[in-house]
Image (tube, rainbow, N blue to C red):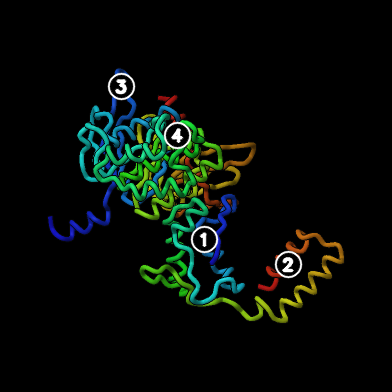
Amino acid sequence: MTPTEESEKHVDELALETRDLGKRYRRTWGLRGCDLRLPAGRVAALVGPNGAGKSTLMALAAGLIPATEGRIEVLGRVPDGTGCPRGVSFLGQDKPLYKGFTVAETLRMGRGLNPDWDGEYATRLIEEGAIPLTAKVGTLSGGQRTRVAIALALGRRPRLLLLDEPLADLDPLARDEVMKTLMASVADTGTTVLLSSHILADLEDTCDHLVLVAGGRVALSGDVEDLLAAHHVLIGAGDPPLEGVVESRTTGRQSTVLVRAPGAVAPPGWRRETPTLEELVLSHLRVQAAQRSAA
Amino acid sequence: MIEFRVDRRSGVSTYMQLVHQVKDALRLGLLMPGDRLPTAREVVEATAINPNTVLKAYRELEREGLVEPRPGLGTFVRKSLVHDATAEGPLRAELGAWMARAKAAGLEREDVAALFKAVTDDTY
């Protein structure tokens, strides 16, 4: 490899890359033809309808299940299927913690299980949440339990943190707390985060990268800023524009058209607006759903 | 020190909101040269936004020559935007007197804001 190639590779360093990745469960495919490139240092939202393949993608990246076909590289390595690769932390939906353990015992377990354990950091995250170390995990609130689980995941000092629906079952206050903990850890360590959720509003301010899966495939992915800049909402009456139309809806005389064309210009009499991330995602999801039911 | 507020419904991107809030604080004299801006970690602990957004806002302010990073220490204010007329001074006193008359005349807060905006738009 020449020096230039090496430096280019560094600029474009990927935390997660998949090519034509597929996973079959008996007769149905949980994920198929999945192509994804997640650059290092991003906080990425993994969104999509239930059953779209979000959890399957997470489990493949965490090395918990083997791929049926295609290729996956995590932090530049192919997971060997023997569990979470070094440098990767995975927190599943069920947040596995022993209810009978105290918080301190849970942290001691983290030390025992992880060669790279940073106990000081994990303890600090617990203390910042004002959770007593002597409390039994079973007596904690949902938000506090999530915080302990996150401290356990971050104590491994991961370069890639995979979080499957970490905010589900949390009240708004606990959600806010958990997001603050996560963002503080991103500020501390620059770790790459891939975080799945179906509540997009939770992610608008925190995620700078979007991965949209639908029907087992990646339907849209990229830096949020680039995606928003490449899309426009055109509102007007009469014949809609033709180029780059993602979705067109008509109510009475008014048409609302989402186009994907960076320099799109509104036709005479039309108004051009910037879509929100939520509008953009919902449009793409509706189109994907319509295509699947037509197929 | 400045405390940021993020309005998720404003339609203005988060990083621009941070830039505007620093500039407002510089105009009003709440931030003066030599003051330190909160670190990215301090901001995200308070607002739960992405730290990269904070860094992007600080880079923009640096590009405009308003702040400067000092490695290992933080980001510091370089330049004040206080117009003597903005914070203290006769113009503020005149506006205060005008607003008192508007209130006495029965104008609501929204009426005053709308009028102020209309006149600003006419003038600038």
Which quarter of the rendering shows the C terminus of chain A? Answer: top left
Residue in the picture at 87% in, 66% down: B105
Q: CA distance from mark 2 to mark 4?
A: 58 Å
Residue located beneath label 2 in the image:
B116
Residue located beneath label 4 in the image:
A136
In percent of width and height, residue B85 lies at: 66, 80
> Which of the two discs, 4 and 3, labels the residue nearer the N terminus?
3
Q: CA distance from mark 3 to mark 2?
A: 65 Å
In percent of width and height, residue B100 lies at: 81, 70
The chain identifier of the residue carrying mark 2 reads B
The chain identifier of the residue carrying mark 3 reads A
Residue in the picture at 49% in, 46% down: A130
Q: Which is nearer the eye, A163 or A269?
A: A163
Secondary structure type for disc 1: helix
Secondary structure type for disc 4: loop
Residue located beneath label 1 in the image:
B16
Res. B83 in view: yes
**Residue flagged by tag 3: what amino acid is it?**
Tyr
Q: Residue furthest front?
A: A134
The reply to the same-chain question for discs 3 and 2 is no
